[in-house]
Image (cartoon, grey):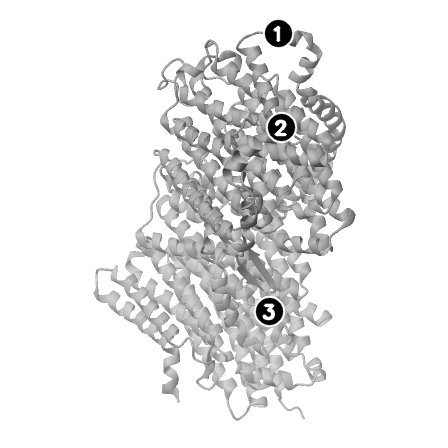
Amino acid sequence: MLTVGLTHFLILSAILFAIGLFGVITQRNVIKVIMCLEIMLNAVNIALIAFSQSVAPVSLTGQIFAIFVMVVAAAEVAVGIAIIFSIYRNHESIDMEKFNILKW
Amino acid sequence: MPMQVPWLIFLLPFLSFLMIGLVLRPFLPRYPRLAGYVTIGAVGISCALSFWVLGAVISSPGHMLPVDDIRWAVVGNLEMHIGVMVDSLTAVMVVVVTFISLMVQIYSQGYMKGDPGYMRYYAFMSLFTACMLGLVLANNILFMFVFWEGVGLGSYLLIGFWFHKPSAANAAKKAFIVTRFGDLGFLAAILILFATTGTFDTGEIYKLVAAGTLTGTTLTWVAIGIFAGACGKSAQFPLHVWLPDAMEGPTPVSALIHAATMVAAGVFLVARFYPIFSHSPEAMLVVAVIGAFTAIFAASIGFVMNDIKRVLAYSTISQLGYMMLGLGVGGVAIGIFHLFNHAFFKALLFLGAGSVNHSSGTFDMRLMGGLRKSMPWTYITFVIGSLSLAGIWPLAGFWSKDEILMNAFSNNPTLFVLALITVFMTAFYMFRAVFMTFHGEYKGGAPSEHGDHDEHPQGPHESPAVMVVPLVILAVMAVCSGWINVTGFFNGLFEGDVEGAVHKIGFLEGFFGTLTHPLPLASLLIALAGIFLAFAIYIKKWISAEKITNAVRPLYTLLSHKYYMDDLYENVIVKTFLYNGLFKLFAMFDTSVVDGTVNGTASAASSAGSALKKLQNGQTQVYAFTIALGVVAIAVVVYLFG
Amino acid sequence: MIMEHIQFIAPEISLLCFALLIVLLDLFITQKRVLPVLSVIGAIVAATFIIVIWNTPPVGLFDKMISIDPFGLFFKLLILAATVLVILASHNYVLKFNKFQGEYYALLMLSAVGLMLLVSAINLITIYVALELSSISLYALVSFLKDKKSSEAGLKYLILGGVASAILLYGMAFIFGLTGNTCLTCIAEYVRGMPFKDLQEVPALMIGLVLIIAGFGFKIASVPFQMWVPDVYEGAPTTITAYLSVASKAAGFGVIARVLMTVFGLPVWLHNDWAMIIAVLAAITMTVGNLVAIVQTNIKRLFGYSSIAQAGYMMVGLAAMGLTMGTKENVTGGLIFFLLSYTLTNLGAFIAIIAISNKINSDEIEDYNGMIKRSPLLALGLTICLISLAGLPPTAGLIAKIYIFSGAVNMGLAWLVVIAVINSVISAYYYFKIAKAMWLGTPVTEEKVDASWPEWLALAACVVGVLALGVVPGLFMNLTTAAVRIFGI
């Protein structure tokens, strides 16, 4: 019978991380890019909690770490959205490919 | 004496340079005179401190002051030390340099008045003085070399001070290039020294030489290398050709750099490394022979020059030869004593020539004449300087020249004869200059080389007080500076024992007693004969100068072409050999290989930059992709090699 | 136990309180000039607290979350100094965002709090939180001008910073998963106790190491994580560019040095591994930075690439530091000294640039032509800083380079030093390009350029520091060696 163990969680986490990274690289909509960032962070959260479950089940360090990550991510998104507002006002667009005045 | 004093001697002129260059020139360009005051103030304090150091050295046992190195920084395992060396040689040199520099700076206030480059002039002068002092004070041959090049740079900048004159620009270039030949030798000597001893420290080198670690051919080659450097700076044959041309610079520059200090740096260098020379008889012989030969060779050219500064320039070369001869046959004290006296009277003569030029607007003696009436102070001081240079008792030049002759007599009779002939020639050409310039009728002069013409009253006139006062002070020194060794005080200072030396003979006894010895008396009579000959030809016209000239036409031509040395360098060596041979080869190599490489590197760098910057295309997601790729790449490399 | 440890984080707490106070006061007062005064006072109060606790023996606080040691305290002072200088330099610049001055100063101070916690954090969780505290404040600050360039820079910084912290976190998760601990010293003990064979079989440690280097590599602008730097530097308000280029970078080096030295310091093969990664990255980083800097025409962008190149030199010091672990050699303070020198130098240069750009409203190098005639002092100050950046005497830059390079040679990194020296020569070209424009170029207009007194004060402080470090480096050497001594074994 298949037991769901650490390895499976880690593989899930790795897949999620890759999906997030892929999204960050390929999505043209800024909002989606930020969402993909969140996916990456959540992939890390899964890894943290899975590790915590298997190597330090008593101390809950991993879970605590994950909560910190979520809080920080929320703050980051808030600032991110504010910046998107600002850039939308300037460009009338939230297409990533349009934001390339700064280059070379 | 506090340890900081020797440091301050060097730092003050340097700070003055920084202050003029970084503060006064950019921010206060309307007040050029400030630059003069800053320089004079800095050099003046340095001069006072130098006398303090000299006093401390005289009263300390062994005439050597221990000054701790400053541990500048410990960088990792690397300890960086900087330090000064204060012994009798240093003390005498700093006094000479700061004193002459002070006189020249004061004099320049008058001479350079109204020149558009006034601030630049004082900035360079400060820089030069600082480098010269650094050279004298350094206790490390590497730092000495840095300052050695520094004085070379100062000289280059000041010779070419009026760079809009092509002759000045060329002279500056010539001086720079010719002295570089000598510096190659110096650099080689430093490298050999470091390779064999592993140290740059002068004190350490002394110890190793004394202990016999450094001997034989290596020692001789090091000595020859150092002497090659000295030859370049001190304009010894065959590297003397730059000095007469260097007279294109402002006259106070010639007085400071090309008479009293920088050209003496070569003599100083030999004296500083005297332990190396004294352990190698071959090297000593080379020094003495080159010195004696240069002395008579340059003096003979001085016979026929019509430009007063060039007469003085050849005289300087000749006297530097004398100093080298003194070092070669006598010792540090003998050579440096002549350097000490020479600095005063030669600076005086140059400043006098400058004063004459200030009035007549020319350096050509054929256009002068009769100036003694209109310029009494200049005349008197110039005559004193000339008498001192000719070696007339009891003026300064007599004492040091006498010692050199005496030592040459007991060591090497051939060189002694050469030196004695030089005495005659020196006296003759100096008084030829005096009589042509100051006696007879005024012959018109020419427009001035410098400054504002409007303020000058027309016709010959005495220079302003700011120029005359330094002349008078220097004249006093030109009379008295030699008396310091009448009792053997100066020699004692260098041999490490003043007390023992001075009690041997009383001052008056030495002062007058010297005339009872045959050798000093002979040299005095020979000098007087030289003066008399000049008097006979140029004042009384008993003998016609033209007749002599015609009688020895080939000789005259040879002399007035400076033995064709310049032509030899210009036509044979430079044009034929260097330009058409070596330089063409270099040029080919340069254009095809070096230029190709340099341009190639430069354009490769900037095209690599242009290519790399294209990666930075402004697309955030490309950057994110790069980050991801980077992580993967590092992971792969670590997996493969880790 | 918590209360008695409070005094040790008094600097951060006081700075935080002042930041909040400024936000509140901003609502009520109309005389906005009070705000910078208050923020400078806040920084000075924090610095005073640091000096008070300077001599306490190293101690871990709050169950090994934060450590108080000379290393961290040194960086805290450096960060505070940079903050004060940036606040002074903002005196005229803040007029560009008149309505939000309070937020500007408060965010600047919050970011300083984050950086200060970052350099003293000794737990993965605190490291992450402190890093984000400073980063999120900086995201906002970078887009503070709210124009096209500034908001684009902010967005780029946010997204790439987010990716970098996700990577960093992922690395931390692996380290945590391997050891079951988040405190650095506990992890280090575990790693040291592990048999070599296990470490080879379980790649978690190496994966964690690579990901952590990548995550911090973003912060310190190491190739290939450096691409945000020029864009963000160009778009951000110049004062924030200055802050980013020194404080954020210094803290980045502080934390990466601490993590690598404590967690991955021993056994020997482990630090050899990461030191070699850092060394290779250093060589690429400085070369890329210098080559691209040559072709820049915008001074802020040029300084972006220059700061990448400088990061390369610092990584040489970091690699050398790693190699000294476990040997008889003393840990070299080269990196710390370089950071000190670089902070003063780069800030000095930026302060001059800020003052000049306030007046001429341009960051193009050609507009600096003949600046010596328009403002001799600013041009002189900028030139001295450029000389120091190029690593020439008599400035801090030379000593810093000698220090860092001689340490690297001792540790057998001669090849890297050769590359670094060649790079220094290349860099002199573009630094002198600016100096040449200022001294020899013909000015477009004769109009004078002046600065306000706080700007002069800040510039003078930097220039004096640069020269003092260059002339009497001995005074500061002890400080820097004391700071790194905690890593000695």
Of badges 3 and 1, the one in the foreground is 1
The crowding category of the residue bearing disc 2, from other C-alpha atoms within 10 Å (few below 14, some 14 to 19, many at least 20), is many
Q: Amino acid at mark 2?
A: Ser
Left or right: B278 in relation to A46: right
Proximity of marks 1 and 2: CB atoms separated by less than 8 Å: no
Chain designation of label 1: B
Chain designation of label 3: C
The residue to which callout 1 is attached is: B546
Which image quadrant: the N terminus of chain B?
Answer: bottom left
Residue A31 vs C181, above or below: the answer is above
Proximity of marks 2 and 3: CB atoms separated by less than 8 Å: no
The crowding category of the residue bearing disc 1, from other C-alpha atoms within 10 Å (few below 14, some 14 to 19, many at least 20), is few
The residue to which callout 2 is attached is: B318
**Could you confirm whether marks 3 and 1 are on the same chain?**
no
The residue to which callout 3 is attached is: C321
Which residue is nearer to you in this view: B406 or C330? B406
Left or right: B189 in relation to C10: right
Residue B247 at x, y percent in the picture: 55, 25
Q: Is residue B257 visible?
A: no
Between the residue at mark 1 and the residue at mark 2, the CA separation in whole angstroms equals 25 Å
The crowding category of the residue bearing disc 3, from other C-alpha atoms within 10 Å (few below 14, some 14 to 19, many at least 20), is many
Between the residue at mark 3 and the residue at mark 1, the CA separation in whole angstroms equals 83 Å
Residue B86 at x, y percent in the picture: 54, 51
